[in-house]
Amino acid sequence: QGQLVESGGGLVPAGGSLTLSCAASGIIFSLYVMGWYRQAPGKQRELVARITPEGSTNVAESVKGRFTISREHAKNTVYLQMNSLKPEDTAVYYCNAEPLSPWVGIDYWGQGTQVTVSL
C-alpha cells in the first residue's frame, strides 16, 4: 500500500521561502508522476507543479519563476522549493503520485501540509 508523507509547511512572511518534502513509500517511485497541489479555503484544489520520472516539469502560471519542483529517486522524495512567497500562496499543499499507467497502480495523496504566508 502506497503512502505519501509531506513535511516542511509552516508560517512565513511574504517574500520568504519554504521547501516542502514528500516521502513516498510502498510504490515504485520511478513509475509515478509526482505532483504538488494546493487548496485554499473556499477554493478548489489546483495543480501547482508536477514532475515526470525523467524530470520533465510543468508549473502553474501563478507560481512560475518562484516555485521549483524536483525529485530524488534515491530517497523516493519529491520537493517543492517555494521562493518569493505571497499571501495568496496560503493553502494546504498536497503531494500526489499518479501512475504512468493504470497497470502500475492507483493515485495516492498525502495528508497535506499547511503553508501560511503573512503580510
Image (cartoon, helix red, strand yellow):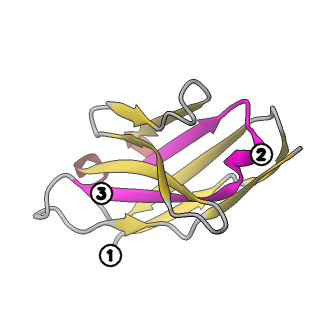
| Image: magenta residue range | 77-99
Residue at mark 3 to residue at mark 2: CA–CA distance: 29 Å
Would you place residue 8 above or below residue 66 in this image? below
Element marked by disc 3: strand
Q: Are the residues at dot 1 and dot 2 in contact (C-beta closer than 8 Å)? A: no
Q: What is the count of numbered marks? A: 3
Q: Please give left or right for residue 59 compared with residue 90 in the image.
A: left
Q: Nearer the viewer, mark 3 or mark 2?
A: 2
Q: Is residue 96 magenta?
A: yes
* Main SS class of the magenta portion in the image: strand
From the top left corner, tell me how far across and down residue 90 is, in percent.
Answer: 71, 53
| Residue drawn at (38%, 34%) of the image | 58
| Residue drawn at (57%, 49%) of the image | 21
- Checking the image for residue 1, the label placed there is 1
- Answer few, some or many: residues within 10 Å of disc 1's Cα (few below 14, many 20 plus, some between 14 and 19): few
Residue at mark 1 to residue at mark 2: CA–CA distance: 36 Å
Residue pointed to by mark 3 = 98
Q: Amino acid at mark 3?
A: Glu
Q: Amino acid at mark 1?
A: Gln
Element marked by disc 2: helix
Element marked by disc 1: loop
Residue pointed to by mark 2 = 87
> Earlier along the polypeptide chain: callout 1 or callout 3?
1
Q: Quadrant of the C terminus?
A: top right
Q: Quadrant of the N terminus?
A: bottom left
Residue farthest to the left? Answer: 103
> Earlier along the polypeptide chain: callout 3 or callout 2?
2
Q: Please give left or right for residue 5 compared with residue 89 in the image.
A: left
